[in-house]
Amino acid sequence: MKQNKRRAIALFSGGLDSMIAIKLMVDQGIEVIALHIKIGFSGTKDVSKIMEERAKLAGAEFKIVDVRDEYIQNILFDPVYGYGKNFNPCIDCHGYMFKIAKKMMDDLGASFLVTGEVIGQRPMSQRHDAMKQVSKLANDKEDKLILRPMSAKLMEETTPELEGWVDREKLLDISGRSRERQLAMAKAYGWEDYESPGGGCLLTESHYSDRIKEFIAFDTFEVEDIELLKFGRHFRLPDGAKLAVGRNKEDNEGLQSIQSDKYVRIKLPIAGPFSLLSANASQADKILAAKLAITYARSSAKESYDVEVGEESVTVSPFKEKKEAQAYFFNAK
């Protein structure tokens, strides 16, 4: 095998499979850049620090590229290969990520791409035929620069193997959903922290997918809306306004972190949830939003409260029972 010092870009989720894929390359003398492509749907918490620590643990440099706006514009609503069970365009998403990484190869001095994908682990994107579709989307069908070390011995040889940049015999033949071999390897490496840091992709979850489907029937989906739909109770008011009301501390903090001209804040005079309302809400929707927000506070139906909706103050009383408020849930039948 040639001894040239090579560099690879590894698509990095922060999970165990991508860590092992990197380690397999590092052990062969390959310099690895762990590239996390941020599309925005990986969970409710910022796990970039955890991901950087795990990349370093596996022996790689860490880099993030934010493509949220481009992803919404070009992939999310018009996937070539459609969706999975929910709003997840997995094949198009993977192809898009590889396409981005491939474009970065020259600037980063990389010779090939690496991923922790395992054949048969995921029903939509990790089948043999799906991986071929991903290669097509990434413009890699001829170049064959995408190496999947976890399942390489079960697949056609790639350019890094054919050129001798990596030793195929030191790659793996893992397939299916069992994690037994990966867990054994993690133990051998001395790794203890390796579970998926982001909790998986929200686009594969029905509750988040339902929120997107409902949202786009009324409004244009933009980057700030990715975060809005992650937190709180969601209401659709009679004149079309969107209202999000926090349920707990995490929701309140998540909603408070959103900076957008599309929404105004609702401030309560007593202890209660943080809420956001569409900035273009009608007067009737503003009054209803204030009434809904105060209903979920420590309020009394016998009292009236001055609630700030953006720069306006409205006086309302809460609903007597929460079930009255629940009639305005975005998915209420």
Image (cartoon, rainbow, N blue to C red):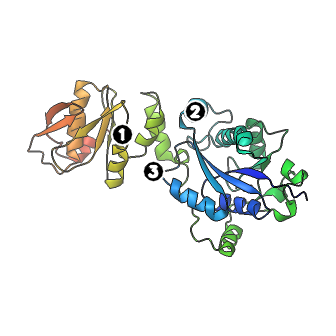
Q: CA distance from mark 3 to mark 2?
A: 20 Å
Q: Secondary structure at mark 2?
A: helix
Question: Which corner quadrant of the image does residue 317 belong to?
Answer: top left
Residue 169 at x, y = what percent?
A: 87, 63
Quadrant containing the C terminus in the rendered view: top left
Using the image, determine if residue 60 lies above or below residue 125: below
- Crowd tier of the residue under label 1, counting other residues whose Cα lies within 10 Å: few below 14, some 14–19, many 20 or above: few
Q: Which residue is mark 2?
A: 70
Disc 3 to disc 2: CB gap under 8 Å: no
Question: Residue at position x 21%, y 37% from top?
Answer: 290
Q: Which residue is mark 1?
A: 332
- The amino acid type, in three-letter code, at marker 2 is Glu
| Nearer the observer, 5 or 165 | 5
User: Which numbered circle lies on residue 312?
Assistant: none
Q: Secondary structure at mark 1?
A: loop
- The amino acid type, in three-letter code, at marker 1 is Ala
Question: Which corner quadrant of the image does residue 25 belong to?
Answer: bottom right
